[in-house]
Every structure is written in C-alpha cells, then in structure tokens.
Image (tube, rainbow, N blue to C red):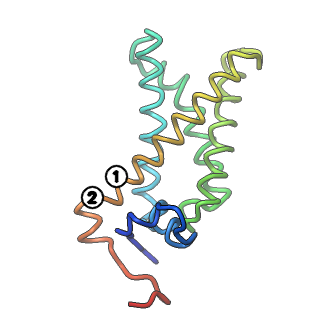
C-alpha cells in the first residue's frame, strides 16, 4: 500500500503547487484509520446537534441523525473508491454526495418536507461535517504515531 505523510505545512501558502497542497491535505493512510475518522466527524456533528437542540444523547437520536449520513457517506465512499485511492476530488465528491444524500434520507425517514428548514440543515451539515472531516484528518497527519510508523516516501519523489 502506498502510504505518504507530508510535513510540508508551507504547502498551504499562496503559490504552493497543487501536488504539495494535495499531499498535505489528503495524506495516504490505511483505509480503516480514515474511515473511522470520517465516521467520528459525522457522529460529533450529530452529538453537537442533539445537545444544542436539547434532544439528549440516545441511541434513537444517533440512529435518527447520524446513521443516515454515515450510511450514505460510506456508500458514496465505496462507490467512489475513497478509501482505496486518496484524491481530494474523491473526498469532495464523497462529502457532497454523502452529506446531501444522508440529509435527504433523514428527511424522508422523519416525514419532513424539503423546505427551508431542511435546506438550512443541509447547509449546516455540509459546512460542519466538512470542517470536522478536514480537522480530524489533519490531526491524524500530525500524530507522532503517524510520523513514526506511517511515513513512507512516494515512488517517483526525489530526495
């Protein structure tokens, strides 16, 4: 498996090459680690929503709010081979399809109409889950374990 870990945090500066930005934002990792971090991001989003809307934390609440999004996220990720080949475009497509589809499935299960409230929920879900996924993947890239055990140079990289 081709694993790559970038410590080139300056790649995010203006004028950085696309390749440098890709290798910094989308590290190549074992599929399970990324899949768990993505699921955690969605569960954290659901937890924030359950607490902030005073629904309380319950299995039913997580099944109602997180499960549809997690299910569609992983269905999209499987179809797009997100965890096989790490590319920013695959992550972006999985994010857009997974969150949008998950919110639609949730609305259908709850018998809600696709009105302004659901559109607002979709916008909040897209932004929050996107930020959480990026943050968790960034944390993974910064862990000492990742530096020690997962750093591997890519073939065709000079130096």
The image quadrant of residue 114 is top right
* Residue at x 53% of width, y 66% of height: 22
Q: Nearer the viewer, residue 122 or 7?
A: 7
* Residue at x 47% of width, y 52% of height: 35
User: Residue furthest toward the right?
Assistant: 114
Horizontal and vertical percent for residue 7?
A: 34, 68
Q: Nearer the viewer, residue 55 or 129?
A: 129
Using the image, determine if residue 103 lies above or below residue 158: above
**Disc 1, SS:** helix
* Residue at x 48% of width, y 69% of height: 23
Q: Which mark is residue 32?
A: none
User: Residue furthest toward the front?
Assistant: 14
* Residue at x 38% of width, y 90% of height: 159
Horizontal and vertical percent for residue 91?
A: 59, 55
Contact between marks 2 and 1 (CB within 8 A): the answer is yes
Q: How many marks?
A: 2
Horizontal and vertical percent for residue 99?
A: 62, 38
Q: Between marks 2 and 1, how big is the CA–CA gap?
A: 6 Å
59 sits left or right of 119 in the view:
left
Answer yes or no: is residue 1 visible: no
79 sits left or right of 13 in the view:
right
Residue assigned mark 1: 139
Horizontal and vertical percent for residue 70?
A: 55, 39
Using the image, determine if residue 44 lies above or below residue 51: below
**Disc 2, SS:** loop
User: Residue furthest toward the top?
Assistant: 54
Residue assigned mark 2: 143
- Quadrant where the N terminus sits is bottom left
């Amino acid at each position: 498996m081709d694993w790559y870990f970038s410590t080139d945090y300056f790649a995010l500066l203006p004028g950085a090459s696309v390749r440098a930005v890709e290798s910094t934002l989308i590290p190549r990792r074992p599929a399970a680690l990324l899949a768990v971090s993505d699921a955690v991001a969605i569960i954290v989003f659901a937890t924030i929503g359950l607490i902030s809307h005073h629904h309380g934390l319950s299995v039913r609440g997580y099944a109602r709010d997180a499960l549809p999004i997690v299910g569609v996220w992983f269905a999209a990720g499987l179809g797009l081979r997100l965890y096989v080949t790490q590319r920013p475009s695959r992550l972006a497509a999985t994010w857009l399809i997974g969150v949008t589809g998950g919110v639609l499935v949730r609305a259908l299960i709850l018998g809600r109409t696709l009105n302004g409230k659901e559109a607002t929920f979709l916008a909040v879900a897209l932004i929050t889950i996107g930020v959480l996924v990026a943050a968790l993947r960034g944390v993974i890239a910064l862990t000492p374990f990742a530096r020690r055990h997962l750093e591997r140079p890519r073939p065709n990289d000079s130096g």
